[in-house]
Structures are given as C-alpha cells and as structure tokens.
Image (spheres, helix red, strand yellow):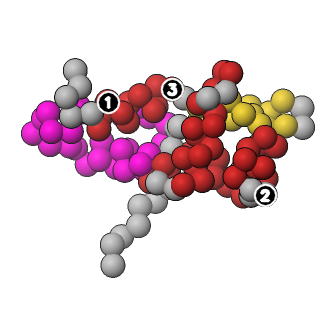
Amino acid sequence: MPKTLPMLQDLSPICCAPLGSSSGLSPGDALALALRLKALADPVRLQLLVHMLNQPGQEACTCELAPLVELSEPTISHHLKKLEGAGLVVKERRGMSVYYQVVPEAIHAIAQTLHLKCC
C-alpha cells in the first residue's frame, strides 16, 4: 500500500526547474510539488479553483462557492483549507464572510514545473 502524503502548511515557492530539463528533483522540491498536486487532485477543489480564476480579482466567498458544487459551506471550507495549506489560495475575512483568492504565482510555478518545453 502506498504511503499517503501529509497535508502540510507549505507556502514556500516551488523553485525547481521544469521536469526533464535537469538531472533530478531534490527531495524537498519533490515534496513541495507533490503537496500542491495532492491539493489539486480533487474534482471539487479543481471546480472551486477554476471558478475563482474566472471571477473579478480571482476571488470568491464561501457562500458563493457552496451552491456551485452543491455542497455545504463547512465542506467547501474544508476543501479551501486544503488549497490554502498548499499555498494556492489565501483567505480574508470581510465582516461575516470569508473570501478566498487564488495565488497566481503558485499556479504558474506548478505549470512551469510541469511544462516540458518551458524556458
């Protein structure tokens, strides 16, 4: 049985070269990339992320997101917490509402790492 990856709070940037362009991937970079990919490897989280990316300011309130995927706000908060822990979104409380905003640099770093003909 494969060992599951921990969901750690990791906000550090991914600084590794595109896969296939260097001799290897350090254990630290491999873990950082794997944690982010693990956070993205969920259909609901991908739907939430895509929705936020298409909004003005690339942000949305949990109250907007719950009906989008037909889940309760606590369940949405759980998914957003996983994305936040991977450094893919940040949150801000505004009165009684919590808004989550995409961190474009984090998404771009993953894309660069996975892009085989990048740079």
Relative to the observer, which residue lies in front, 43 or 98? Answer: 43
Write down the region rendered in magenta: 9-37
Q: Position of residue 104 (x, y in %)?
A: 51, 26
Q: Amino acid at mark 1?
A: Gln
Mark 3 or 1, nearer chain start: 3
Report which residue position mark 2 lands on.
72
Which quarter of the image is occupied by the C terminus?
top left
Residue at 54% x, 55% y: name it: 43
Q: Quick one: quadrant of the N terminus?
A: bottom left
Dot 2: within a 10 Å radius of its alpha carbon, few (fewer than 14), some, or many (20 or more) residues? few
Q: Residues within 10 Å of mark 3 (few under 14, many from 20)?
A: few
The Cα–Cα distance between marks 3 and 1, rounded to whole angstroms, is 12 Å
Answer few, some or many: residues within 10 Å of disc 1's Cα (few below 14, many 20 plus, some between 14 and 19): some
Task: Assign the magenta stretch its main secondary structure.
Answer: loop
- Residue 82 located left or right of residue 109: right
Taking depth in this image into account, of 8 and 65 the one nearest to the observer is: 65
Residue type pointed to by label 3: Pro
User: Which label sits on residue 112?
Assistant: 1
